[in-house]
Image: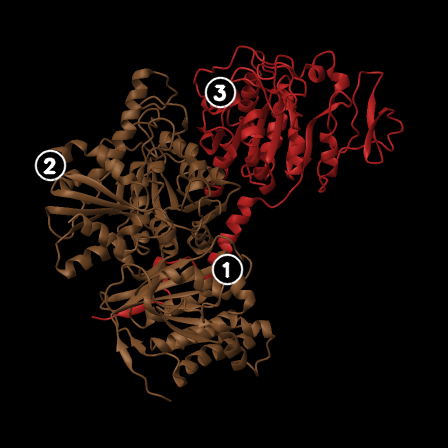
Chain colours: A brown, B red
Amino acid sequence: MAAKEKKLVPAVTVRFAGDSGDGMQLTGDQFTDTTAVMGNDFSTFPDFPAEIRAPAGTLPGVSSFQIQFSETPAFTPGDVADVLIAMNPAALKVNLRHIKKGGLMILNENAFDKDGLEKAAFGANPLTDGTLRDWQVVKLPLTDLTVNALQDHPLRASEKDRCKNFFALGLMFWLYDRNLEHTVEWISAKFAKKPEFVAANIAALKAGYNHADITELMPTRFEVRKSKLDPGTYRKVTGNEAAALGFIAAAELAGKTLFLGSYPITPASSILQDLSYRKEFGVRTFQAEDEIAAIGSAIGASFGGELGITSTSGPGLCLKSEALNLAVIAELPLVVIDVQRTGPSTGMPTKTEQTDLLQVMFGRNGESPVAVVAPQSPADCFDTAIEAVRLALKYMTPVVFLSDGYLANSAEPWKLPDVDKLPRISVQHPAQWKGPFTPYARDPKTLARPWAKPGTPGLEHRIGGLEKADITGTVSYDPENHEKMVNFRAEKIARIADDIPPLSVRGPAEGPLLVLGWGSTHGAIRAAVDEIHESGRAKVAQAHLTHLNPFPKNLGEVLSRYKTVLVPELNSGQLLMLLRHRFHEATRQSGTRLLGYNRVRGIPFYVSEVRQAIEARL
Amino acid sequence: MTQEVPSAGDPRPKFTKNDFVSGAEVRWCPGCGDYSVLGAMQQTLAKFDIPRENYVFVSGIGCSSRFPYYMNTYGFHTIHGRAPTIATGLRLVNPNLSIWVITGDGDALSIGGNHFIHAMRRNLNFNVLLVNNEIYGLTKGQYSPTSPAGKVTKSSPYGSIEHPINPLCLAIASEATFIARTLDSDPRHMSAIMERAMRHKGVSFVEVYQNCIIFNDKAHAPVTGRDTREDRMVYLEDGKPLVFGRAGDKKAIRLNGLYPDIVKFDPTTPQGLLVHNEADPRPNHAYLLTQLTYPDFPVPFGVLRCVEKPTYDDMMNQQIQDVIKKKGRGRLKDLLYTDDTWTVTP
């Protein structure tokens, strides 16, 4: 057994790529779990097609999983991979742009036969024609090695073949000096009912590890030391998982039944799925016949005095617009989870974008303000979900929770909160009323109307989509009343600004440049700004918005302290448009320029491009 | 709805019709059939011991959807076609309310057609009252999904080229557990049917033949008119043959293979006649009744179907209870702090 050199690196990005049927997401998940157990910081990015099983070996069928893990903080899944494992030629072709020049490629040469090359539309064999001269290439017959390792196992040939992802995982575990224990346990539990699969998958995993160990295959081993995360208890969490947990927590904190009305849609479906398992919390999930029924049922639950929420993505949000407006005029609490994806129309369902901001702000008839919040990382979906519920219940208003496809599926370590210290959400339902019940009498501070539950004697009342008279809530066509109610609804949302933290800035409090983002771009912006700091070139200020409607009270004042404000967004400048409109006067007076940096490719920002965009403005 | 049945001990009614009148000015056109539907509903609620705070009337858009404003109960006038969805959410968070969805032919069968069939097939425990006047009234006179082919309206000046939907047929195709038909000109029958609907556990669907005096006056008159009704309506009675027609010229329905025939009714030899069985668990009988349509057959009024099936809401509650029984009531701390956590020490 050759003792190999081990190279210490602060951060590594690895990409697993194969056919949709090759189990790459599972392989990536297992690698991630072990990364977590080994104490690294990490950020993951599953990148898969909408097709469930495109024809095997073809370019559309490629499914990839990228992870950056590190000793230093990992704010993103990494721009390009240091190491790529490609299970077939199509996976190689699709991912050539995702691997660093000079990086390591581990290729399954068994798949590089005539058929495989044709399906991937390679004219000549890239293993031999010099295409890969810029990379360190390790080719090995992954399929044969796996099948050989499983010679004595009582599985069919096709079943043995399917174990090759664990062989590949074993190679990677060796390369980064990880232990196999966690995955061995996982395999044992996962296939508990099929001991022959347990034995074969573990054998493949160990064979991969040992193969790397005893051959001269890999040039070096790498070591990534534990990250200096804050002390605490952690778990791995994706954005959708954290959101589901956040809404359960919010319901518990408010003492309400959580009701989710939802229609399956990528990339939001896993919230419905996760919540449908949580019946021990009394969570009621209703898989509706369509998007409209989904939000309608949530509004019905809220009218009934419980916590109604609905989850969807952009196309579904379009369908929900009319019902969302009903919740606006009826002034009922409601949370609409929009896990944004590319549009217009069906767009690219599994790809991410931040293109629904203006839709949630303005995409309804009439003057129709709603509160809008956006989580900035997978784990932050938990806190932001609780915040969305807090605002909805306190102000009797719909709140839109703007996540996106990247946050939904990306995972990171989550430092678990002290459950006992999470603030309660207080909710009051009137039990009686002085005189006839007045459903539109407002709380003088929040302007919220009373939330009388059906079943409460004496508070019988009728609400609905027709304009209502102030205080009494009877149907009203009075011009002055309508204007008053329009203003009340706007003012109610505006007053939320008194109830949210001011925007805080990292870095200089004034100066040449502030980088202002919102939502899932936080990691890339943060990493870019940090790189610039470390390079010693300049000090750039960074701020990130969680509350998009209303904005934090100090936002205009913050903007006016900088010469330039750069707003990177995964859209064509939607927040930028809001800022330019809202703070036109303030920024004109201070001479602040508001500029965008906008990409709409369906992928998250690369740190390098955000860094370049920032540097171009320095 | 069967949650609360009048107590047997006290025969005096606890409520009167007026207890359910909201006092809001009713703004339907003079002579609109909706007035009698509203009155029959208020009359019906007075037959139960359910206090008014436990009723919720949910409606969509259309003339009939103003209904909740006139009921002194909880009410929600929602958006076009979507009332069943709001009622669904409400039902699923509160098992104690008595819920009525008030809808019309356009609301339920056109824009809300999807929600209608799903509310029926799920067997949610609420009542759906469809006020059918075969016209769009609130938008001033366009043809509706129940308007007959050839109907001349403002939007079909050369006659409608659409085939109408048969609401009861759609309900039975969705396996609704309670299906009935009544008419605005017979308040006693209406109230009796509404009462039956309320006592049914599971979804109750009631179609009301209603007259729009302004845009579709006398649309149902060929069936329900004073001169024609004896020959063209048949009141269903459970366990009895379908007998109709004037005295001295009574007729009944007999099955000829799969198809109904009209035969002379002779009470001394009722053998072979179609006998109503509202509790038939199979949908075939009720489906056959929905196919008795004007002008070939007398149109059936009454309860076409009333069968027991588990309700969606009960099953949801049961699943939740079963899981809690098995796992214990969830604790937030256990939910977050799972087996796959790791600890970082200072």
Residue drawn at x 26%, y 36% is A578
Q: Label 3, label 2: how many angstroms apart (C-alpha)?
A: 67 Å
**Residue under disc 2 on the same chain as residue under disc 1:** yes
**Residue under disc 3 on the same chain as residue under disc 2:** no
Position above or below: A66 against A586: below
Residue B66 image offset from top left, x and y in percent: 48, 22
What amino acid type is highlighted by mark number 2?
Answer: Ser
Can residue B344 be seen? yes
What amino acid type is highlighted by mark number 3?
Answer: Asn
Which residue was labeled with disc 3?
A: B18
Q: Nearer the viewer, residue B228 or A155?
A: A155
| In-image side of B169 versus B8 (left or right) | right
Position above or below: B47 against B157: below
Mark linked to residue B79: none
Residue drawn at x 66%, y 31% is B168
Q: Secondary structure at mark 3?
A: helix
**Quarter of the N terminus of chain A within the rendering:** bottom left
Kindly identify which chain the residue marked by label 3 belongs to: B
Residue A51 image offset from top left, x and y in percent: 51, 53
| In-image side of B74 versus A135 (left or right) | right
Kindly identify which chain the residue marked by label 2 belongs to: A
Which residue was labeled with disc 1?
A: A121
Asked which quadrant contains residue A325, the reply is top left
In the current view of this chain or complex, which residue is farthest to the bottom?
Answer: A1
Q: Nearer the viewer, residue A130 or A237?
A: A130
